[in-house]
Image: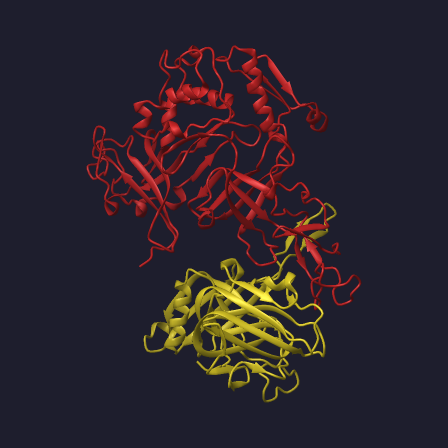
Amino acid sequence: MIRPESYQILITPLHKRGVYDTPLELDFDQSDYINDSGVGVIRQEVDNGDFDFGTFTFGNIKIKGINVDGKFSSINDNPKTIFRWDRDLAKVQINYFDGETNTPSVRFNGFVNEEGTLQDFMTQEISFDVLARSSIFRKIKVTGGQISNNILFSNAINRLLNIPEITSILNYDPLNINLRYDDFLQDGSQFDDLPVIEALNLLLLASNSILVVDTNDVIHVRSRSENPVAHFFYGPGDYLGRENILSLKRFNDGLQRSFNSIVVNDAAVLDPGWIFEAKLRQKVIELPFITNPDIATNVATQLLYSFKHPKLETEIVVKTKDALAVNILDSVGIYYPKRVKPLRGKKMAIYGQRLYNDPDVPYPFTHDDMAIPDVVKFKVIGKVENLKDFTTTLKLRQAGERNATSGYFGYDTSYQLMNDDNYETMGGQIYQLMSAVS
Amino acid sequence: MALSGQVSFYEQCKNLIRNGASVVVTTGTDTANYILGTNKYLFWESVGSDDTITEEIEITFPIATEIDRIFLVEMNFKDFDVMYDVASVWTHFSGVVGLDGPLANITETVYARDTAYYEFTPVTTTKIRIRANTTQVVDAEKFLRQFIATVEIGTLEGYPDVTNRFERNARTIQAISGKKAIIKSYDILDKMAIKYKINPYQNDQDIVERLYDSDKPFIVWPCGGKFGADDGCPTVGTWFKIQQKGWALKDVFQVQTDGDLDSNFYNNIYKAGTEFSMDLAESID
């Protein structure tokens, strides 16, 4: 029998210090004891909010357990608890079943953070903070001398990540370190005693790269370039009824995340053309480990390439089933034409099928204020998976960098963005619909 | 099951373009894919056709598929036939029952309705071909809104209370003047409530429970093949006094169950039949 679409929450407690119970799925499936209104969202993002660029976030989640029988209590509070050693660092895995096979998809791996555990005596519920495994970066500091002087950024990142505290939890391979820009740092002592996460953020910024931990706990350090694999989503006006976008929101031109002047330490680079277009938008970054002004200039130049052009941004809400195969930085196309409706009893006017002024095909009604053609190439910069309603929000930014004509499928500069009533695209071919009569 | 005119249910269309089906037409290539979609407002239409020209529509399923029902929804064909592929040979369907009763195969010469429906002995095939020769209005361009090939889930034997509610997905915004901006959108079947006060048929109970269990959308045809209206004195051959939205032959909806299934025995008397209600709503997938 196929398990219906559902989530499964597995908790693997510690058997003794550092040793986990052997996971047997039926024994550790706690789904029946987790309040469905007490499960947060699984969030994964590569930038800091809407108004900045950053490096990565693999969010933590909260879960609320039904604790009427003391199942999730501390060992000191109730002998019936499943936590026979300690709640802290118990493993939590969230799986998703799509309702078509019995093979689960792992959506989240983390561990319980006892600091965030709260118990409600009235409702007999207990809420846990569950940290993503990547949050280990917050719990370790850089030791003195760990980062030497005059080494490459990639070398420094390797020294930060390739330590037992991290490799015992996450999967690390130096071959997965592929920086967008690599150069030499001068003063490694600037990293001493910093939390590893801060040190990583600085190095990732300097190298114009991001860090992603996938659902197999493999660390990837890479550029922001989009993956070639493309997924397509369709709006309600799709002519072929392929609608799978439940909602589209926060569409904007991306100006808030564009910077046409970057200052790294004292080295400033700017793009006069974009300053003229968009007025000065400057970001100042301090990277104390770089003392060579030429390297500072190169770092600033690389960041300017990536962020001087405003790129369209939007969020789409889709069924989690449809977003399962979509990963961070995958390419996404959105076909969101205006909804058109012929006059009652009349046919649609289609370019190439009918003549102008044919009385049988007057111009249709059109709804919606604008459309998005499928030639615009977006990339996924964030995923927010809602466990309660089986939907996922994909945060998208137009792909491409360096120039205004990248960021389109086929890289054909003849396509134009859809802010003009007269042009739509269907399968890559431009059709001219009759102008709307509303 | 013979065409009885009760509310009928079918599996999701087997030839949707979103699931990998494809179509080739003689003319009107730009609009051919609409036949495989679910947009109610878009039609395939021939280009430069008349009653001396046969338009062929060849539909390919994503995989070899078993079917036992087909719909041609909103079309103007008068003289046409439909065949299926057997090892690259176009073959007539057998055991055919249409809206007017049994037929030797799916071949019409004087068809006059806007929607056609046929039941037949189940076949497994990868291709279907439609040949449209003439139109109901002489020498008109041929058109077809949607072709549906499917398998029947079941037809109700009883006559439950059916309540349809359509909506235009309207958004109402009050402006500063106090007037309202009412922004209408696509017309959808927002709710089809099926309620049995006392259901005496195991068949109907089984159908409803199967629909409730279904994780995929399915098709509902409220009229079940009933047609004809006469607001005077309904004559033989007409089923309705007044034709209304939701009950026409062309009103075929892709729906899913929306909400709970109330399932009880009438007055708790186990021998008295079941009492249940179920809501359906038009769904995207």
Quadrant position of residue B228: bottom right
Looking at the image, residue A151 sits to the left or right of residue A273; the answer is left
Residue A201 place in picture, x, y as percent: 46, 23
Q: Is residue A89 visible?
A: yes
Quadrant position of residue B200: bottom left
Looking at the image, residue B281 sits to the left or right of residue B187; the answer is left
Can you say whether B174 is above or below B68 in the image?
above
Looking at the image, residue A163 sits to the left or right of residue A82; the answer is right
Q: Which chain is red?
A: A
Q: In this view, which residue lies farthest toward the front?
A: B88
Q: In terms of depth relative to the viewer, which is nearer, A113 or A340?
A: A340
At 67% across and 76% down in the image, what residue appears? B53
Q: Is residue B285 visible?
A: no
Q: Which chain is yellow?
A: B
> Total number of numbered labels?
0
Q: In terms of depth relative to the viewer, which is nearer, B89 or A7?
A: B89
Residue B83 place in picture, x, y as percent: 52, 76
Q: Quadrant of the N terminus of chain B?
A: bottom left
At 35% across and 54% down in the image, what residue appears? A101
Q: In this view, which residue lies farthest toward the bottom?
A: B236
Residue A136 place in picture, x, y as percent: 36, 27
Q: In this view, which residue lies farthest toward the right?
A: A357
At 74% across and 47% down in the image, what residue appears? B177
Quadrant position of residue A293: top right
Can you say whether B8 is above or below B189 in the image?
below
Residue A437 place in picture, x, y as percent: 75, 56
Q: In terms of depth relative to the viewer, which is nearer, A27 or B53?
A: B53
Looking at the image, residue A372 sits to the left or right of residue B88; the answer is right
